[in-house]
Amino acid sequence: MKLLLLSMLMAVTPNSAEGEKAAKEQMMEKEMQLAGAHSQAKGSSGDSLIMISAKDRADDYQKAFQLLRDEKSTAKVYFQLAGGKKISNVIELKIMPGSTLVLFRYSTPQGVKYEVAGIEDIVGISHL
């Protein structure tokens, strides 16, 4: 009986060591994949990827818009959007309740117009 129990323990022990080794290998592989994803997230200029909430980003754009409008009241504030589009002569910027969309009110020769853009589509803000 003791011999049978001892042989069973010996049979189980190598398997658990092999299981630990396999688990360590899987963990190392996942770490390497994450490291590869991190290095791909870095741009060619060495920029890092940062995470910021949509609300914080929207608040920053709204404050920047207010500052530019107050500082250079005669200059026209414009927003550069992804895809190369520019929204110029912005009169008002309103952040939607979910903080993921921005409503622009801007003047054109045809009158005041409105446009909505996703907060992630805004590339920059400037004045002319």
Image (tube, rainbow, N blue to C red):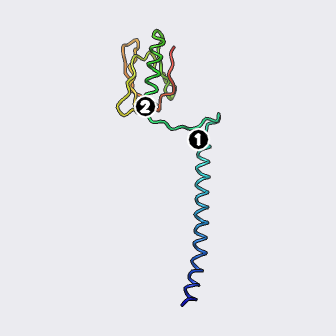
The residue under the point 40% across, 11% down is 109
- Compared to 118, does 114 lie above or below? above
Whole-percent x and y of residue 43?
61, 36
Q: Which residue is mark 2?
A: 118
**Label 1 to label 2, Cα distance in Å?**
22 Å
The residue under the point 57% across, 63% down is 23
Nearer to us in this view, 125 or 19 = 19
| SS under mark 1 | helix
Nearer to us in this view, 93 or 19 = 19
Which residue, as the protein is rendered here, is positioned at the far top? 74
| SS under mark 2 | strand
Query: Identity of the amino acid at label 2?
Result: Gly
Which residue, as the protein is rendered here, is positioned at the far right? 45
Q: Which residue is mark 1?
A: 41
Query: Identity of the amino acid at label 1?
Result: Ala
Nearer to us in this view, 84 or 90 = 90
Whole-percent x and y of residue 19?
58, 69
Q: Is residue 29 left or right of residue 105?
A: right
Specify the quadrant of the image occupied by residue 47. top right
Q: Which mark is residue 12?
A: none
Q: Is residue 11 left or right of residue 73?
A: right
